[in-house]
Image: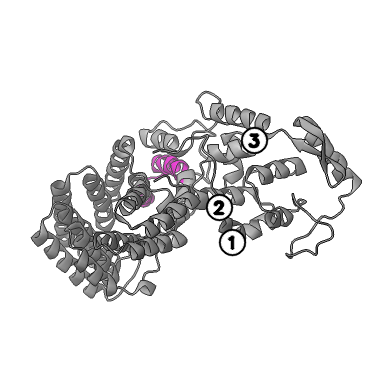
Amino acid sequence: MPRRASDPIVIPDSLWQRPQMAEALRARSIGVVFRLVRQHAGASQTQIGIACGMSQGTVSIYMKQGGRQVQTLDVLERIADGLNMPDTARMTLGLAPRTFDPSAAPTTNATVITRPDESAVLAASGFLDSLDVEPDVQQEGQPVRRRTFHKITGAGVFNAILADLPGDGAPLEGVDAFTAALAGYPDIGSPPSRNTVDLTRLTNAVAAAKRNYQDCGYSIIIDSLPRLLVDLRTACEAHDGDARLRVEALSAEAHHVAASILLKLDHEGLAWLAWLAADRSMQAARHSQDLTIIGSSARIVTHALMHGGHHGAATQTARTFAERIHRDADDKTPAFLSVYGALLLRGAVAAGQRNDRDTAATLLDEAEDAARRLGGDFNHRWTAFGPTNVQLHRVNIALQLGDAGAAIHQARRVNLDRIPQTERKVTLLIDTSRALTQWGKHDKAYDMLSFAHSLAPEEISQRPSSHRMMRELMTTAPPSTKRDLREFAAQIGVRL
């Protein structure tokens, strides 16, 4: 069931103990705090806005790299209350704890405010007056002013939901931003500058998008990639000659990432958008005149066909492009072998999904030969290709063919330490969890899933396919595992 904007945020207690969160609180980097809550609690910007009494657009501004900083104590207090920060987190942020005992010794290294100065008291008093408080609530013989949170929350929900409606002049975000960028009608901003079309900046930005994808930093990509797609289109129009070919190659890679992210969202209404991104990737790849880039874009076209259930067409596409680029390439460089082998692996997965065992086995063997020629595990052209990646695909394909025992056997042969890319590592863990579920090893399946979440929270808390797998495990697991799974799902904000 999709999460609603008014649903409460379930923040795991462990999040407040993470070093990255402690550092963000000490620096009062609220944008980082919000991004961590989004990543580890699965909260949307609208939910965070509702909790903290601000609009979704304001939350977005805070969350952007180098975005707005919080300058006033009252806003920090409102955020701390809205996210229900424990006292240790509040004190790290520089706020007084909610349940502070002045006679007790501090238990953390955070600064403890035992006696705020007069100006702070006046500021806090003015803030409380502005929010409608109820005086004369007695606590230890002293009157305490208490907020009427139901009034604040009602206004927060109302404003945050209305803030998401079009027509307020706010920049497009999320899937809407992707749609506008891919359709060619982005928000009209400032005229193109030298920085917009600078090849070094664009190269670094595409590399960052690829890196974030492999690190499972999907929310970061969703925030930044639409603007990059627009800049690349502008750069294509501004350059010619060899520079134009370089920009076309970058555009192909960026659209590849866009299609990959949209496919991971796994929503029926986004399938056409993912296909559009994959097609744009292939168009740009052809314009780049680079066989390696063409082979890379053929991978995402194959993936989009698979997602649409066209497994035969996907298999044929992968095989045809692999044969063509292998025939036409004069120099079989490491980058070429990596893309070529990764394309064969994508075709093998498509064959496995249509239960074509012979073709899947043939393509796997051809990919293994390419990995042998490559000579090891590398990440040329962001493929993470090598012998280990071939082994990961043998696990996945055995699972697709319904042979859980073979999948587990293949998984045992993988050295997890040889997989530096988080996305690849977590994919193996999820595949192994699915195989363990099919094999009836429910407790181990849950342990594998929990381990995957510790490495890449967004891969588990945000992906519908992971949610379906959890529900599948829930239906067949014994009571003890069901209890653990139910608690785990509640902790990461997933409804089973």
Q: Is residue 197 magenta?
A: no
Q: Which residue is mark 3?
A: 53
Hey, what amino acid is under mark 2? Answer: Leu
Using the image as rendered, state which of residue 355 and residue 4 is in the foreground.
4
For the residues marked 2 and 3, what is the alpha-carbon distance in whole angstroms?
18 Å
Question: Horizontal placement of 73 versus 187: left or right?
Answer: right
Residues in magenta, as a range: 225-250
Mark 1 crowd level (few <14, some 14–19, many ≥20, 10 Å Cα): few
Q: Residue at x 16, y 67 (%)?
A: 366
Q: Position of residue 240 (x, y in %)?
A: 37, 45
Using the image as rendered, state which of residue 406 and residue 210 is in the foreground.
406
For the residues marked 1 and 2, what is the alpha-carbon distance in whole angstroms?
10 Å
In the image, is residue 153 above or below residue 210?
above
Residues tagged 1 and 2 counted as in contact (Cβ below 8 A): yes
Using the image as rendered, state which of residue 470 and residue 169 is in the foreground.
470
Q: Which residue is mark 1?
A: 18
The answer to whether any part of residue 482 appears in the image is: yes
Q: Which mark is residue 36?
A: 2
The answer to whether any part of residue 198 appears in the image is: no
Identity of the residue furthest to the left in this view:
358
Secondary structure under the numbered disc 3 in the rendered image: loop
Q: Position of residue 259 (x, y in %)?
A: 33, 45
Q: Is residue 239 magenta?
A: yes
Question: Horizontal placement of 447 versus 123: left or right?
Answer: left
Secondary structure under the numbered disc 2 in the rendered image: helix
Q: Position of residue 36 (x, y in %)?
A: 55, 52
